[in-house]
Amino acid sequence: MSGLRPSGYNLFTMKVADLGEFGVIERLTDLIRLRRGQGIDAFDYKLLIGAGDDAAAWRGSDVTELVTTDTMVEGVHFTRATTPWRDLGWKVMAANVSDIAAMGGLPLYALVTLGLPPDFDVDDVDKLYAGMLDMTEEYRFSVVGGDMVRSPVVFITIGLTGATDGVLMRRSDAEAGDQVAVTGYLGSSAGGLKIILGELEAERKAVESLGEAHRRPRPDLHQGRILATEGVKAAIDVSDGLVDDLSKLCRASRVSARIQAHQVPVDPTLRRTFPQCYQDLALTGGEDYALIFTAPQETMKRVLPQLPTPATVVGDILDGEPGEVSTVDATGKDVTPAIGGWDHYR
Ligand SMILES: [Mg+2]
């Protein structure tokens, strides 16, 4: 590790401007080399040139390739007060991996562009990268390059490639008569954020488990692979909230949906901590990075028991106003969630 710490600098006060663009990039290239992901040979891909050259290079394979991108901007998607740098690195990577999971693929190569103010601590750049590399190690893919620019606020843009040897899951392939299901629990990330923001006193267990759900969301990559392999054709990941993301899927498929609000799976800790609004959090809270998928009942019956973690049927796809998602309670009465979904321009 000594190569990462140029002598003569105090690590804790060194700023990005002190080290300069090339110094920082060289340092990050070393960090990447130390913690290269294991999955770079998925589907017989071969990485020929990783971070450190003019461009990354790899030899492909006879599969379907995927690419996605996601950006997080300080003051828009996160604040320094509520998101530690290492968690932020994990989260921005998670958002991209989750998009690959929603297509039924595996992640391969990531490009990372950082916008940093000149007075940003180099130590914090390391933390940000550590969070991203935590995810590449765990989900087995690689950062193969990137860029760094001066910016008045911190932003991170990640481009991520992926691949699949199977059928893609699309937003546009839901059909009236399908059931709607979700992986895991919903609302935990939004509940965790409320706790982190100090909106209520929570018991220690809730602080830990819901806080973890918000700080370190885990994309359902393995689940996505199984769904696609087993014939599920339509899926989307939950980044902006169940109602919101299901509405996007419905719009793309020219159908509507009805959610049975009481069937939406909620962590018992969330229910206990937010007895008044746990259901609203589950319906509209974002950043859970679970998967929403739709399939005919027979397919659902076959697929659900094969998943390594529970998934739950929460509603139905209907003919109707494209994109419309209604939520009803156990008696069939309409329940409108109190909190709206996330919209970047609202
Ligand atoms: Mg998505």
Image: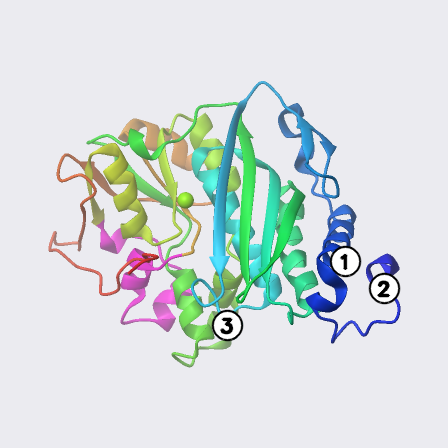
Residue 331 spot, x, y in % from top left: 12, 54
Residue 6 position in % (x across, y down): 85, 64
Q: Give the magenta range.
A: 260-286
Q: Residue 316 placed where, x, y %?
A: 22, 39
Residue positioned 61% across, 44% down in the render: 111
Instruction: Indicate which disc, 3 or 2, sits on the residue closer to the N terminus.
Output: 2
Residue 129: image location, x then y, percent: 66, 57
**Which residue bears the numbered disc 2?**
6
The three-letter amino acid code for the residue at tag 3 is: Thr
- Give left or right: position of 105 versus 139: left
First in residue order: circle 1 vs circle 2: 2
Residue occupying the point 48% across, 48% down = 70
Residue at mark 1 to residue at mark 2: CA–CA distance: 10 Å
Q: Residues within 10 Å of mark 2 (few under 14, many from 20)?
A: few
57 over 31 or under it: above or below: above
- On residue 82, which mark appears? 3
